[in-house]
Image: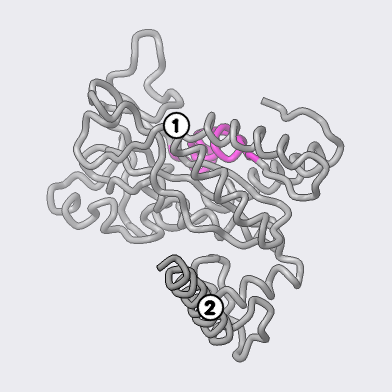
Amino acid sequence: MRTLHSILVVLGLVFAASVSQTFAQNRLPPDAPRPIEAVDSLWAEELTSMEIRDAIRTGKTTIIIGTGGVEQNGPYVAGGKHNYVLQTVLPYIARVIGKALIAPIVKFVPEGNIEPTTSGHMQYAGTISVESATFEALLTDICRSYKAHGFMDIVLLGDSGGNQRGMERVADAVNRRWSGEKARVHYLREYYFEDRWSYSYLKTLGITQIDKTPPPGEPQDRQADWRNGIHDDIYYEAQIAVQDPKLIRMEQRIKAGLFSLHGVELAPIDRTIEIGRKLAAYRAEITARAFEASRRRLKEGLPAER
């Protein structure tokens, strides 16, 4: 019986090896030539594996990883606010940086305690939160995956405040792990923190937002992400409108006579969309400067500026 069993085991292994070899023969190898013309897209998820491989070979070795979020944003703005803003701004950033592709947006981020939902965004329906450890593990593996395929400059930037510390920790930890290697992770805090919500820039466009009930001792036009009891801002609404005015409930608000925000009229919508494009270009310039500074700093082995 033992002899029969041994024979069956051997036959099974031979069969498995044969099947594995057959499958391998039916698969294109990673270095197979691309049979058709490449599509031109900045978004990595819109490209084929061959197109990404060949883009890397031609020098596109920067990948931009944007982290967004799904949270409550008051009565007018869809929960995916941060993700829609990133859809608008990331192509501007990639073009200014040059030789860069954009990773799929990381849409799920820390938004507060899941159980119990006693504070923060998780009190509101539709918000999705993940633990900080989950978020950081995911970002780490995304960075490792892109490095494995030849990306040298891996950019982390986040459109929400709760994302920032996790991205910073990931960049520091991964860069320590990759010490002595050429690939680097760049956490660009400036994207979020420099002229936060483009407050000063919006004023240069003649836009001042008013909070009728500011905290005691603070001005009505203070720099803030909460005004008049809602988590909403022209910075976000204008960039989201670039994607689709339905995401800021344009038609419903016009019908209700509420197509304004914090004292700023949003009609005509074409003007608001143009403001959104200007904001994206402005954030792109900030981010590109931060990227170049990070490259110099990491090349010289200097500590990050926090």
**Rendering coords of residue 270 (x, y %):** 38, 61
Kindly give the residue lying farthest to the right in the view shown.
Answer: 300
Q: Which residue is mark 2?
A: 14
Is 204 colored magenta in this rendering? yes
At 57% from the left and 59% from the top, the residue drawn is 102
Is 68 colored magenta in this rendering? no
Left or right, 287 with reference to 131: right
Left or right, 300 with reference to 69: right
Q: Quadrant of residue 62?
A: bottom right
At 33% from the left and 37% from the top, the residue drawn is 129
User: What amino acid type should be assigned to the residue bearing mark 2?
Assistant: Val
In the image, residue 164 above or below residue 69: above
Numbered range of the magenta stretch = 187-207
Left or right, 217 with reference to 95: left
Mainly helix, strand or loop, the magenta region?
helix
Which numbered marker is on residue 194? none
Kindly give the residue lying farthest to the top in the view shown.
Answer: 217
**In terms of depth relative to the viewer, which is nearer, 19 or 5?**
5
